């Protein structure tokens, strides 16, 4: 029997059928490529659950983004997604109301707040990527915005480039459900030591929002600079903002510029927390209005000891010189004078008026030149002022010495005794352990920028800890969330910022967002390695830690 006579037509038929299938289904049943699989497995922060379904969704110029009729806010999120994808793909994805079911399918992306379950909370989302369409569902627009960041991460890294790239723009199909662990996930930028302009702050906001952070704490005042216009005390910004560490020209935000930052942050579902650091760290204010000066300790060589007993106070009620060094803990407001509280009232009132978010941060750290009894009075009075402006007070851990309770938030940074005291008094905590989260700490002894008084913090160390590790008697219920500060004594340019925050920032974002009792550096570093090309595509100048086998 001649088999070949039967087999050839058989294979021929199979071939034709295959070709037909490929054409009619527009590649839709294409299995997930290794690249798309890797992207799906490498999302940071790690989603609560990911179920891969093995096929491919391909974004094309015909893809539309659809939203439910009537929601301008969701339309803005859809437009944000379209804008992010445009430079690299070259597609101007249209944003429209979903008027028929058909539009939610056939290669389109659909963002909706209908049909989400309550357990997704304010920021959770579900994302279903099939070979035909993408559906992103959340209770609140904030959840949609977080889900959009996941969509970006499922696409190839080159999608983040600012010039047009060749496709295809493929994503793995999957069902993702994702809910954050902590409600406060933030980063602090110190614009007091070195000033950073509005555009830099916007870029900072973009970088932290990519990792689903939701708070930006701005350190607006410090010994070296007062960076926010206060109309009733104009000399604060004018004189107090006129220089910075190293003697450069400094700067400040007008109230309009600050509002612009706040609005930009809001568009990324990030709340700005403004800090006016008092009663210490106030030299710039004391230089601007001498009557506020409670007397300073002469800045010594090296860090001023935390419990310094003998204080030599100089120049009470006289303006100080502007300060451009990097010592801490030498200045204090004149707390015993009633007029000082008139000043604080004006500052908090004006700041509250331009801050839609719920929090005002009072600093309160390292007030070594303030007498303890004065410090306690200060915390109480400042708290009353914040409450009168219908805001919630946050302060660094030292405020635990004062009369605080559950209506105040304490930010832990170094001293367990204060962190624990704050929790005992009923305050919730923001966890910023300096040995882990201080992004101004050097990676190792060869890092050119940064300090190392708390620790050297390599990228593995930055990731390998849990907010519940630090304080006795403090469990997750006492913790509002985590924040990673970038102090800027040694940080001058945007490149400096990027180098110090990446790659550590994505780890903090994951600690704040993801619940994983088995969190492990070995598992994380493989995902982290795939974010190098994403940062490169975003033109982020990151630290190429040798602990990670970065993908090219
Ligand atoms: C401590 S943390 C400070 C800052 C410095 C930082 C430098 C804290 C509440 N105070 O004023 O900038 O160390 O690492």
Image (spheres, grey):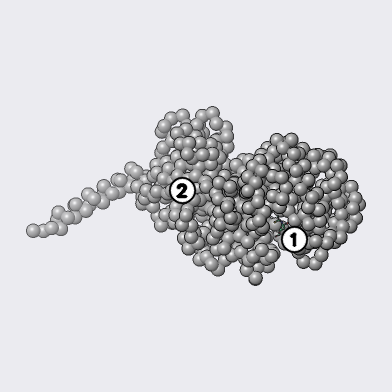
Q: Is residue 469 visible?
A: yes
Q: Is residue 512 above or below residue 122?
A: below
Task: Locate residue 378, reporting x and y percent.
Answer: 78, 46
The residue closer to the viewer here, 212 or 415, is: 415
For the image, the number of numbered tags is: 2
The image's mark for residue 48 is 2
Q: Secondary structure at mark 2?
A: loop
Q: Secondary structure at mark 1?
A: loop
Toward which corner of the image does residue 426 lie, by quadrant? Answer: top right
Task: Locate residue 353, reporting x and y percent.
Answer: 74, 36
The image's mark for residue 306 is 1
Task: Locate residue 512, reporting x and y percent.
Answer: 55, 51
Task: Locate residue 417, reporting x and y percent.
Answer: 66, 56
Q: Is residue 250 visible?
A: no
The residue closer to the viewer here, 466 or 102, is: 466
For ligand 1, give the image quadrant.
Answer: bottom right
Residue drawn 48% across the image and 36% down it? 118
Q: Is residue 72 above or below residue 334?
A: above
Which comes before the other along the chain, label 1 or label 2? Answer: 2
């Amino acid at each position: 029997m001649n088999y070949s006579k039967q087999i050839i037509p058989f294979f021929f038929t199979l071939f034709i059928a295959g070709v037909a299938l490929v054409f009619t289904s527009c590649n839709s049943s294409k299995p997930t490529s290794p690249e798309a699989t890797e992207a799906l497995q490498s999302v940071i922060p790690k989603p609560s659950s990911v179920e891969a379904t093995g096929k491919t969704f391909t974004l094309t110029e015909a893809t539309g983004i659809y939203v439910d009729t009537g929601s301008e806010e969701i339309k803005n999120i859809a437009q944000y997604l379209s804008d992010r994808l445009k430079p690299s793909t070259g597609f101007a994805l249209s944003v429209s109301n979903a008027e028929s079911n058909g539009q939610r399918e056939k290669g389109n992306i659909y963002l909706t707040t209908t049909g989400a379950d309550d357990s997704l909370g304010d920021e959770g989302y579900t994302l279903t990527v099939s070979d035909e369409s993408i559906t992103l569902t959340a209770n609140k627009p904030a959840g949609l915005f977080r889900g959009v960041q996941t969509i970006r991460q499922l696409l190839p890294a080159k999608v983040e480039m600012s010039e047009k790239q060749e496709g295809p723009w493929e994503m793995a199909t999957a069902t993702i459900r994702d809910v954050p662990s902590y409600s406060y996930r933030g980063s602090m930028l110190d614009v007091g030591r070195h000033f950073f302009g509005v555009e830099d702050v916007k870029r900072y906001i973009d970088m932290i929002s990519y990792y689903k952070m939701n708070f930006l704490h701005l350190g607006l005042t410090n010994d070296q600079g007062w960076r926010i216009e206060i109309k009733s005390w104009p000399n604060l910004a004018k004189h107090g903002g006129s220089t910075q560490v190293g003697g450069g020209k400094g700067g400040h935000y007008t109230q309009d510029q600050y509002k612009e930052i706040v609005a930009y942050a809001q568009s990324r579902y990030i709340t700005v927390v403004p800090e006016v650091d008092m009663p210490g760290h106030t030299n710039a204010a004391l230089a601007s209005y001498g009557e506020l000066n409670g007397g300073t300790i002469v800045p010594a060589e090296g860090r001023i000891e935390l419990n310094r007993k003998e204080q030599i106070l100089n120049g009470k009620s006289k303006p100080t010189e502007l300060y451009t060094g990097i010592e801490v803990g030498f200045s204090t407001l004149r707390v015993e004078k009633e007029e000082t509280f008139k000043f604080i009232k004006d500052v908090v009132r004006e700041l509250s008026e331009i801050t839609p978010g719920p929090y005002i941060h009072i600093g309160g750290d390292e007030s070594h030149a303030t007498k303890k009894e004065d410090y306690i009075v200060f915390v109480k009075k400042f708290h009353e002022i914040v409450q009168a402006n219908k805001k919630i007070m946050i302060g660094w851990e030292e405020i635990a010495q004062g009369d605080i309770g559950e209506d105040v938030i304490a930010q832990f940074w170094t001293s367990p005794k204060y962190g624990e005291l704050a929790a005992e008094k009923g305050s919730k905590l923001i966890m910023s352990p300096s040995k882990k989260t201080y992004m101004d700490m050097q990676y190792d002894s060869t890092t050119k920028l940064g300090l190392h008084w708390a620790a050297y913090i390599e990228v593995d160390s930055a990731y390998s800890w849990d907010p519940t590790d630090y304080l006795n008697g403090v469990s997750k219920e006492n913790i509002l969330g985590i924040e990673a500060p970038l102090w800027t004594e040694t940080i001058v340019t945007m490149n400096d910022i990027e180098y110090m925050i990446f790659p550590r920032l994505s780890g903090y974002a994951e600690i704040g967002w993801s619940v994983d009792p088995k969190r492990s550096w070995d598992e994380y570093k493989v995902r982290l390695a795939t974010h190098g090309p994403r940062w490169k595509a975003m033109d982020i100048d990151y630290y190429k830690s040798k602990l990670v086998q970065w993908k090219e």
